[in-house]
Amino acid sequence: MDFPNIADAAQAEQASRSGETVERIADELKAGILNSHFSPGQRLIARDVAEQYNVSRNSLREAFRRLEADGLVDIIPNRGAVVRRISPAEVLQVFQIREALEGSAARMAAQRIDDGDNRERFIEVLHRGRRHRARPILQDFIVDNRAFHQSIVGLSGNPMMSALIDKYQLPVLMVQLRQVISTEQVISKALDEHEAIAEAILSGQPDAASQAMRYHLWRSTKQILSLADVALQPSPAVMDEMADLLSLKND
């Protein structure tokens, strides 16, 4: 009769706990980056972060590697993990990816809006975002803005799309530019566009939903790139490509 190897079982249990810890700390750090608790260019000092979140250095190093794979931090020799700054070329690439993914998600959401409790759940998220008209605080809005976009992905019925879209959202870049963009103006315009997207989805119009979402992403990206010469210092070649795609020269 074979008996279980107690040492092997203990090692497996320890590895499982370690994996859960790494996942937890990676998720918490990711939330901190996306919700502007950590700023672009900020160094994440391992000793301080490990103490703050009560984790080992080994677990923290693995969490940093996951964040690096997600494109949220750079691991720099002799400096450690640093919250990434997004370049103008990356902004353009992100826009192209999000336009394709979220345009499709909005289309599918409009087709599935009356399935189950989809309509009720979506209206709840939409209503929660409306509070920012009266009290426009960027950090709070970023949370509900992500929730709005994620809810549309949820309505689409394609869970694999959720992780991709979440990765390519731009709240970090919004934080980079908050000193040169009016917070109230950014939030008000975004909420107007959210209403247009929601109206199309709730009325079951797939084409209109897709177009409204693509316009929303295009307009917000164009606004970011219009400030690129001040905030991001792109190369002339990058600016030419931006202008060709987003009509920055003539609009």
Image (spheres, rainbow, N blue to C red):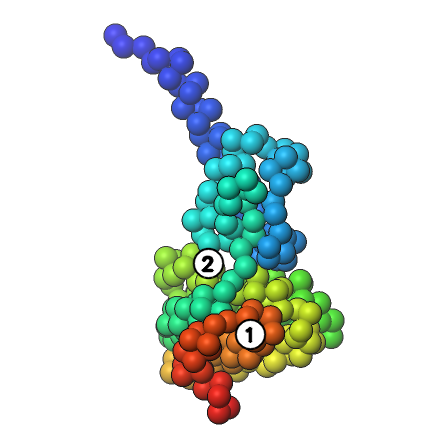
Q: Is residue 75 left or right of residue 140?
A: left
- In depth, the one of 220 and 125 nearer the eye is 220
Q: In the rendered structure, which disc, 1 or 2, sits on the residue that comes first in sequence?
A: 2
- In depth, the one of 244 and 191 nearer the eye is 244
Height in image: 103 above or below 207? above
What numbered label is drawn on residue 167? 2
Residue 11 is situated, as x and y percent measured from the top left of the image, at: 42, 20
Height in image: 202 above or below 171? below
Q: Is residue 245 left or right of residue 132?
A: left
Residue at numbered disc 1? 228
Q: Is residue 142 left or right of residue 58?
A: right
Q: Quadrant of residue 100?
A: bottom left
Mark 1 burial class by Cα count in 10 Å: few <14, some 14-19, many 20+: some
What residue is at 49 percent from the left and 30 percent from the top? Answer: 18
Foreground disc of the pair 1, 2: 1
Residue 188 is situated, as x and y percent measured from the top left of the image, at: 65, 79
Height in image: 44 above or below 230? above
**Total numbered labels:** 2
What residue is at 59 percent from the left and 57 percent from the top? Answer: 40
